[in-house]
Image (tube, helix red, strand yellow):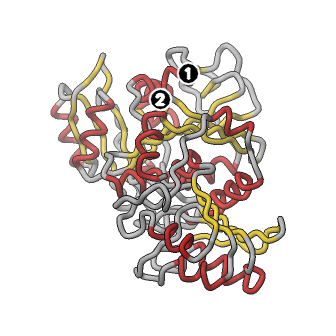
Amino acid sequence: MSFSDSVVQRPEPTPAGDLMRQYTIDDYFLDRAIDLAWLGAGRTHPNPLVGAIVVNDGHIVSVGYHQRYGEAHAETIALERAGEAARGSTLYVTLEPCAHHGNTPPCVETVLKSGVRRVVIPTLDPDDRVYGRGVAILRDDGVDVDVGRRCERAMLLNLAYFKRVLGLGVAVTLKMAVTLDGRIASRAGSRDQITGTDSLRFVHRLRAVNDAVLVGINTVVVDSPRLDCRLIDTEATPVAVVLDSRLRFPETSPMQAGDRTVVVVTAETADEDSVVALRQSGVRVVKCGSDGGRVDVKAAVAELAAQGIASCLVEGGGEVFSSFTQARLWDGMHVFVSPMTFGNEGVALSEQAFDRSQIGAVHAGASAGAGDVLMSFVNEKTRDTLLKHLL
C-alpha cells in the first residue's frame, strides 16, 4: 500500500552528524517516549514496542506505554491519563497510531477525540492494515503530523518487528560491553563484570525482544551464562544459541534450566559421537559450513532462519563480534562503555582495527545510566532498506 507525498511525508534520511547538531525539543520528547517503550519488552509480541508522551505548553502532562499484548496501546493510556489537559497538546508516540480494529479500537479515534493539536512520530507502521492510514486520517481531520525525527533510534526499538512484518530476514543485533580502553576482559579466560545494573537490565530487555540469544563457546566456558531475562518482568525465554565448531559445550550448563531450548551450531566435520551425546542431553545440534576453523556465521544465521528464528541478539565474545562485523551480518548494534580500564593485558573487543564506515555503522543515539554510556548504531544498509518502508 502506498500514498502520494501529499498525504505521507517522506523526508530524506538525515546524516547522523547533522542530526546531533539539529537536536530539538521534539527529539528530546521522542527519546523519552522510546525509553518508555522499552519497558514493555518481552510482553507485547507480536505487537511492537510503543511509548507515548503528551506535552502541553512545554510540560509533560502524561505518559504511557504498551504494557502487554491485547491490552491498551500507548497512545490510549497516555491520553486517558491526560484527560482535558490533552486538548491543544502535542502527542509524541514512537510509531504511527493504528487505524484498524484489533484487540483494541483504532488509536487514531482516541487521538482525534482527545483534541490533540499535533502528533510527532519517528516512523510509519509497515503493517498493511496501518501503513500511512493513521497519518492520513489525522491530517484529514486537521491534526498536524510530523514524521521522521529519531527514525534510526526508533528502528532499533522495533528492529525485530519491522524485519518480520516486511519479510526482510533475520534481524541481527550485536551487543558488547567494553572498558574505556576498548577491552572486554582483564585477561584471556577472565570473567569480569564490566557494566552496572542499569545496563544489565537493558540487556535483558534486548534478550526479551529477540527469538534467540547467541554467544560463542569461549563465553560459555568462561562465563557459564544463563542468557535469560530474569532482571525484568517477562515470560519471554529466547532460544540459547552457541557457536561451537569443536563441540566443547559442557555436560551441564545454566542455560539448560527448565525446558529451555538450547541450540549448538557446529561445523559439518564435528565428531559424530559428540553430536549424539549432546543431543541425548537435550541440546539441539545443527551442523553448517565453517570458515577458517570457525562456524560460518552467515551459514549459522541461515540455519536459524530455517528453524523459524526471526531475530537474534549476538552477545559475543570478541571472536564472534569480529565474525559478524567483518561479514557485515548485523542490523543493529549496542555498545556499553564502562568508566574503567584494563590496560595492555586486557582482551580487545575486535581482532582487527576498524572505523564506523568500514562496517557500515550509522550512529543512532547515546545515553547514560549507572555510570555506563550506551552507544547505539544501525547498519547503513539496513537503515536505507527500512527507510523505503517506514517513511
CA gap between label 1 and label 2 equals 16 Å
> x, y percentage for residue 11?
55, 47
The residue labelled by disc 2 is 321
Q: In this view, does 228 lie above or below 140?
A: above
State the residue at coordinates (30%, 52%). 167
346 and 58: which is toward the camera: 58
Secondary structure state at the residue bearing disc 2:
helix
Left or right of 256 in this view: 190? right
- Give the quarter of the image for residue 381: top left
State the residue at coordinates (54%, 73%). 140
- The residue lying furthest to the left in this view is 272
Q: Estimate how packed mark 2 is, as few (under 14), some (14 to 19) or many (20 or more) residues with alpha carbons within 10 Å.
A: many
Kind of residue at disc 2:
Phe
State the residue at coordinates (55%, 41%). 13
Q: Nearer the viewer, mark 1 or mark 2?
A: 2
The residue labelled by disc 1 is 188
Left or right of 353 in this view: 323? left
Q: In which quarter of the image is the N terminus?
A: bottom left
Which sits earlier in the primary sequence, circle 1 or circle 2? 1
> x, y percentage for residue 270?
21, 28
> x, y percentage for residue 139?
56, 70
Q: Is residue 85 above or below residue 174?
A: below
Kind of residue at disc 1:
Ala
State the residue at coordinates (47%, 40%). 383
